[in-house]
Image (tube, rainbow, N blue to C red):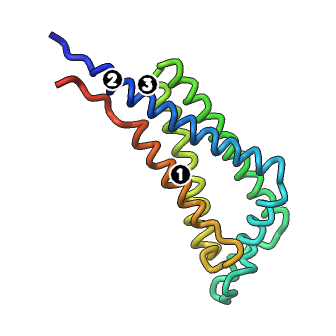
Amino acid sequence: MASTPPRTSRSALHLSATLLTASVALYIALVAFGNITDFGTNQAFVQHVLAMDTTFKDDDLMWRAVTSKGLQNTAYVAIIVWETLAALVLIYGTWLWVRRDDQAARRFSTYGLLMLMLLFGAGFIAIGGEWFSMWQSDTWNGLDAALRVFVLSGVVLLVVNLPERAAS
């Protein structure tokens, strides 16, 4: 007799993946929406981080500063576009979870979550935090917020990719 996954644990895992993907999709959609409708607030953040104007101003590091407003704004718009695309991918992943197309839902959720992990891990933590020495700034330091999104996305990525267990 073939064994099938117990209905309750499969349903619980499916529900968890659906709701967690939806939560991250909602979060990043609101972040992107906020950055679009209140462009100037985080534009200033990106400009200060890239300009390194609130760091220790170590001569050995300041050559890294990007002071061109055009390049700063290009970076900020690229961040917003990336956030928007990640939100759309995660919204689509959520829709697929709701439709019970688990294989496609897992794939799209994974793509969207990895997009966020790249943005907040490589972009904000590594490049912003280390290359542009954001950690040195008391005013323009987004490392805690970036770490929260990175960890949240990683936890959801693990849940989304948990294998379905067969009945004992």
Q: CA distance from mark 1 to mark 3?
A: 21 Å
Q: Counting other residues with Cα less than 10 Å from the Cα at mark 2, is it few (<14), some (14-19), or many (20 or more)?
A: few
Badge 1, how many Cα within 10 Å: few under 14, some, many 20+?
many
* Residue kind at label 3, given as amino acid type: Gln
- Between 133 and 142, the one nearer to me in the picture: 142
Which quarter of the image is occupied by the N terminus?
Answer: top left
12 vs 100, nearest the viewer: 12
The picture quadrant where one finds residue 167 is top left
Name the residue tied to disc 1.
117
At horizontal 67% and vertical 39% (from top left) the residue drawn is: 85
- How busy is the neighbourhood of tag 3: few (under 14 within 10 Å), some, or many (20 plus)? few
Residue 8 got which mark? 2
Q: Secondary structure at mark 1?
A: helix
Left of 127 or right of it: where is 11?
left
Instruction: Check the image and report above or below for 101 versus 58.
Output: above
In x, y percent, where is residue 20? 51, 38
